[in-house]
């Protein structure tokens, strides 16, 4: 597995990471035994960067990783772990975002316990609270480094201007945002800002929430994923149009000898050397297909074919519904 730097001066990690949102019921049922199989496979395939969050399964994802580390002590040294905090649900169940020092400290301490580590490699603010200046939040995060609780920090779904403001206070190790052949908006400033500042760009949902796989979610499968039922790209008539639009992509992947998801990963890695995609899956076989994509040597012929098959703007429907857009910063 090729290696990439997790930000300027950061550790070397596998170019392909693993998104442990799958260690929750977000995309369907998952238990601890299933997480062990995936983490074993990650070690076998050389995937060393794990990405989780305190809200994934209400801490279950972090707890699965922590249990694995306790059962396999040497694994904690081989993996680089990122987690996130800031998404808050009130006792009444109302979702909001908190970036205040007291809340982030509380959530970080709980994550350290669940993950069974002394320090977290990369700690993200999951969503920005616009009422808290990002300079103030960055000072809080820098304090966590000084306290030895984290080794670096990042932000998820922020605008390039926010990154620049934060980086004036302290170097930002990574920025995480959705990026794939179907979501190209980070190319309008965010990827470039990360590159110029020495910040890793971590791409979540690089296989388009299944649209860029061999079996896009549809029919009964969608009933397992409430998020997708309300997502414009998975609502008719958009869903049928998107499945039709991506059919030639699946055919191209098969001709190359990759899974469609593997080809999506190969494309993401080919965009720049500071990009680290973090797909998630509950299947070891699917994980192997993703890893094969990370080993694929991209050619001009395939690049040209992809640009023709899935040009910028091909997708039908927005990537989020109005409710799902609460939190991510829009900048273009």
Image (cartoon, rainbow, N blue to C red):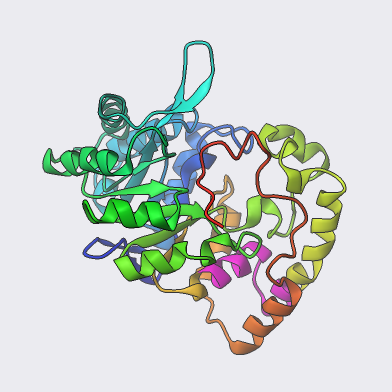
Which one is in front, 93 or 83? Answer: 93
Q: Residue at x 36, y 62 (%)?
A: 200
- The residue range painted magenta reads 252-268
As drawn, is 118 to the left or to the right of 137?
Answer: left
Q: Which quadrant would the C terminus be assigned to in this image?
A: bottom right
Looking at the image, is 185 positioned above or below residue 325?
below
Q: Residue at x 53, y 31 (%)?
A: 31
Looking at the image, is 307 positioned above or below residue 216?
below
Number of numbered tags placed on the structure image? 0
Q: Which quadrant would the N terminus be assigned to in this image?
A: bottom left
**Based on the displayed image, in which of its 4 quarters is residue 288 positioned?**
bottom right
Is-magenta flag for residue 186?
Answer: no
Give residue 320's position: percent from left, percent from top. 65, 44
**Based on the displayed image, in which of its 4 quarters is residue 255 positioned?**
bottom right
The reply to whether residue 172 is in sight is no
Give residue 198's position: percent from left, percent from top. 30, 66
**Based on the displayed image, in which of its 4 quarters is residue 6 positioned?**
bottom left
As drawn, is 67 to the left or to the right of 190?
Answer: left
């Amino acid at each position: 597995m090729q290696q990439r730097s997790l930000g300027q001066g950061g550790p070397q990690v596998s170019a392909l990471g693993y998104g442990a949102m799958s260690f929750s019921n977000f995309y369907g049922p998952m238990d601890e035994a299933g997480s062990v199989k995936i983490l074993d496979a990650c070690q076998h395939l050389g995937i060393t960067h794990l990405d989780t969050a305190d809200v994934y399964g209400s801490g279950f994802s972090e707890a699965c990783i922590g249990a694995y580390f306790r059962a396999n002590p040497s694994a904690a040294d081989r993996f680089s772990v990122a987690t996130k905090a800031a998404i808050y649900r009130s006792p009444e169940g109302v979702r909001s975002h908190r970036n205040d020092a007291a809340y982030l400290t509380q959530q970080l301490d709980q994550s350290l316990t669940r993950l069974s580590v002394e320090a977290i490699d990369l700690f993200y603010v999951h969503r920005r609270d616009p009422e808290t200046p990002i300079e103030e939040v960055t000072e809080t995060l820098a304090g966590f480094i000084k306290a030895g609780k984290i080794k670096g920090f990042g932000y998820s779904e922020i605008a390039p201007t926010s990154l620049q403001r934060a980086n004036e206070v302290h170097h930002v190790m990574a920025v995480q945002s959705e990026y794939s052949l179907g979501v190209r908006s980070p190319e309008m400033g965010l990827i470039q800002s990360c590159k110029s500042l020495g910040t890793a760009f971590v791409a979540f949902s690089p296989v388009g929430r299944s649209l860029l796989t061999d079996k896009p979610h549809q029919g009964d499968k969608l009933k397992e994923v409430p998020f997708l039922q309300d997502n414009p790209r998975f609502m008719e008539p958009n869903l049928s149009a998107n499945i039709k639009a991506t059919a030639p992509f699946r055919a191209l992947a098969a001709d190359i000898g990759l899974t469609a998801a593997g080809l999506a990963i190969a494309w993401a890695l080919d965009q720049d050397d500071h990009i680290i995609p973090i797909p998630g899956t509950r299947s070891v076989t699917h994980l192997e297909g993703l890893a094969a994509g990370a080993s694929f040597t991209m050619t001009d012929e395939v690049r040209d074919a992809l640009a023709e098959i899935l040009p910028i703007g091909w997708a039908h429907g927005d990537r989020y519904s109005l409710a799902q857009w609460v939190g991510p910063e829009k900048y273009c």
